[in-house]
Amino acid sequence: VCNAQPCPLDVMCVARMDLVVGIDASGSMGASGWKAQRTALLGLINRLQFSKKSGLQLGVLKFSYKVSVLQQLTDDKKKLVAAVTKTKFDRWTTNIGGAFRSMKGMLQFGRRDAPSVCMLWTDGRPSRPSSKYDAALGAKDLRSSCRVMVVTMRPAVPKAYVAPWVSHPKSQNVLVVQHPNLMVSKVMDVNTFVCGKVQRFLDWTKAQNKTAR
């Protein structure tokens, strides 16, 4: 649902928030899964209304053994698209604890008067140099600074496994996707999952055209 009503299929996120997204570059994603995840993120970017003053800022990182910040929080869509498009598949382990800690660091570039949301996408459980315990500690620390949400992309990472990481209410902060290759088809689900305020795409387009005149 969107704002207590059934969601339209094609929507724009018009919420004012600072959003940090962490994408999984570990080897278990596979080349096709990595490509689908990246394409899905680009699709999500195209459904966000960016504005430092009144809309959304987005920051993106990827994590494998190492964590790499692809783009700090910004409302510059071109920078975000370029950063996501050019990033490479690391094919290593799953440092979820490190991802959570890096997300917190990225929030220093956020706005004091805007809600902060951190959304992690993963298809695996924590592995070297992270661990289940390390991921739990990183998530606990991050929850003090933002709303923590997780998108799981394989049955091997069930909702119950990641629920301790996310903010309350748990049921509203975990989205289950059955395989990384399905992420492209789930872009609208991810959008309405993370966004507190959506608008039908056609209505949003009409409003933008009217403003431009």
Image (cartoon, rainbow, N blue to C red):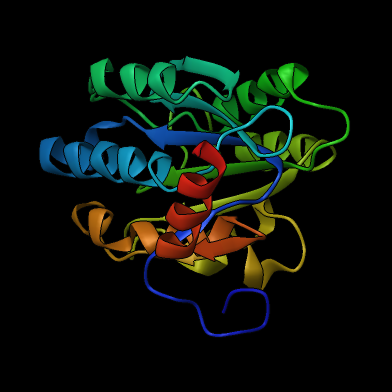
Asked whether 145 or 63 is in front, the reply is 145
Where residue 139 sits, quadrant-wise, is top right
Asked whether 202 or 149 is in front, the reply is 202
Tell me: 81 left or right of 11. left
Could you tell me which quadrant the N terminus lies in?
bottom right
For residue 37, above or below residue 127:
below
Q: Residue furthest front?
A: 213
- Percent coordinates x, y for residue 62 in the rendering: 42, 25
- Percent coordinates x, y for residue 170 in the rendering: 69, 67
> Going 46% across and 56% down the picture, which residue do you hit?
206
> Going 67% across and 60% down the picture, which residue do you hit?
196
For residue 195, above or below residue 67:
below
- Percent coordinates x, y for residue 126 in the rendering: 47, 39
Asked whether 131 or 67 is in front, the reply is 67
> Going 23% across and 23% down the picture, which residue do you hit?
89
> Going 42% across and 16% down the picture, which residue do you hit?
79
Q: Residue furthest left?
A: 32
Tell me: 103 left or right of 200. right
For residue 165, above or below residue 126:
below
How many marks the image carries: the answer is 0
Where residue 57 sits, quadrant-wise, is top right
- Percent coordinates x, y for residue 114 in the rendering: 80, 38
